[in-house]
Image (cartoon, helix red, strand yellow):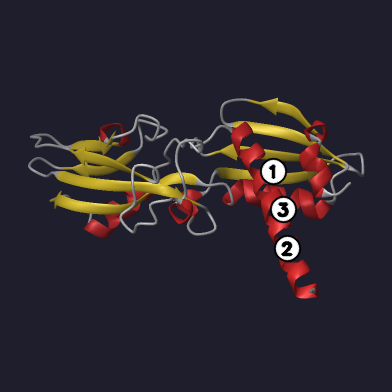
């Protein structure tokens, strides 16, 4: 079986176990090179949202601006692939982006007279579908009198560009007692549900193989 047959016949993909964060599927009759390509794409080839640009309006915390922006960028964000485009594929073709390819999130800790942790729950998004996957991710510790106020801009990206866009934290391929049967296990960051990662991964590998075949055909001509 080649990968095109696999894409057309999803019956070769049998779910062994799944929950909100993790899925294990059985791949039957899939050559190792295609199964491993799917594993790699599920890890870092499926687009997800992450904060890419941070405008620091005020930061009197002990964390420098660069450190604050870095921590914000690593917060996993829920992702809606049906509604948003990757910037390179968006019709706006603008460096500043548009509502179809960029989402703004803001955070204003306000003034406090006690020492406290600023959490991801304080990030407010202009789109309810794009928000932190957890409300309990610590961003910075503030002492009395300290404050942070930022505007963040999130976009779709892929883990091949930066790990903050990884769709999965774990993507492994293991053998079974049958030679032509392998098990793919994917654990999501929370940006997408595990089933979405698998299905998007299948589409992505199929597209890449199609593009590669077109390149080969052009060379042969």
Q: Which is more foreground, mark 2 or mark 3?
A: 2
The label shown at residue 16 is none
Describe residue 28's horizontal placement relative to residue 23 as left or right.
right
Q: Nearer the viewer, residue 142 or 108?
A: 108
* Distance of label 1 from label 2 (alpha carbons): 19 Å
* Residue for badge 1: 202
Q: Which residue is drawn at 52% across and 47% down?
A: 47
Q: Is residue 74 above or below residue 12?
A: below
**Location of residue 210 in the rendering, given as x and y in whole percent from the top left corner:** 72, 56
Pointer 2: what residue? Answer: 214
Specify which label sits upstream in the sequence, 3 or 1: 3
Give the class, few, some or many, for how many residues have Cα within 10 Å of label 3's Cα (few <14, many ≥20).
Answer: some
Query: In the picture provided, is 23 more to the left or to the right than 213?
Result: left
State the separation of the CA atoms marked 2 and 3: 18 Å
Q: Is mark 2 on a helix, strand or loop?
A: helix
Mark 3 highlights which residue? 37
Question: N-terminal of the two: label 2 or label 3?
Answer: 3
**Res. 62 in view:** no
């Amino acid at each position: 079986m080649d990968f095109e047959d696999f894409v057309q016949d999803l019956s070769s993909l049998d779910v062994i176990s799944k929950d909100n964060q993790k899925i294990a599927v059985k791949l039957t009759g899939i050559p190792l090179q295609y199964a491993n390509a799917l594993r790699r794409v599920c890890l870092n080839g499926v687009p997800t949202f992450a904060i890419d640009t941070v405008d620091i309006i005020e930061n009197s915390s002990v964390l420098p601006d660069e450190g604050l922006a870095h921590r914000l960028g690593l917060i996993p964000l829920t992702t809606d692939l049906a509604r948003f485009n990757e910037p390179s594929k968006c019709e706006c073709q603008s460096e500043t982006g548009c509502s179809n390819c960029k989402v703004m999130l803001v955070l204003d800790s306000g003034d406090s007279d006690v020492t406290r942790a600023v959490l991801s729950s304080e990030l407010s998004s202009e789109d309810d579908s794009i928000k932190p996957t957890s409300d309990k991710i610590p961003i910075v510790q503030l002492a009395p009198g300290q404050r942070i106020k930022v505007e963040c801009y999130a976009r779709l990206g892929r883990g091949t560009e930066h790990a903050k866009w990884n769709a999965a934290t774990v993507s492994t391929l293991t053998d079974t007692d049958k030679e032509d049967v392998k098990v793919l296990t994917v654990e999501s960051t929370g940006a997408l549900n595990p089933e979405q990662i698998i299905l998007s991964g299948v589409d992505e590998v199929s597209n890449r193989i199609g593009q590669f075949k077109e390149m080969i055909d052009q060379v042969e001509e």
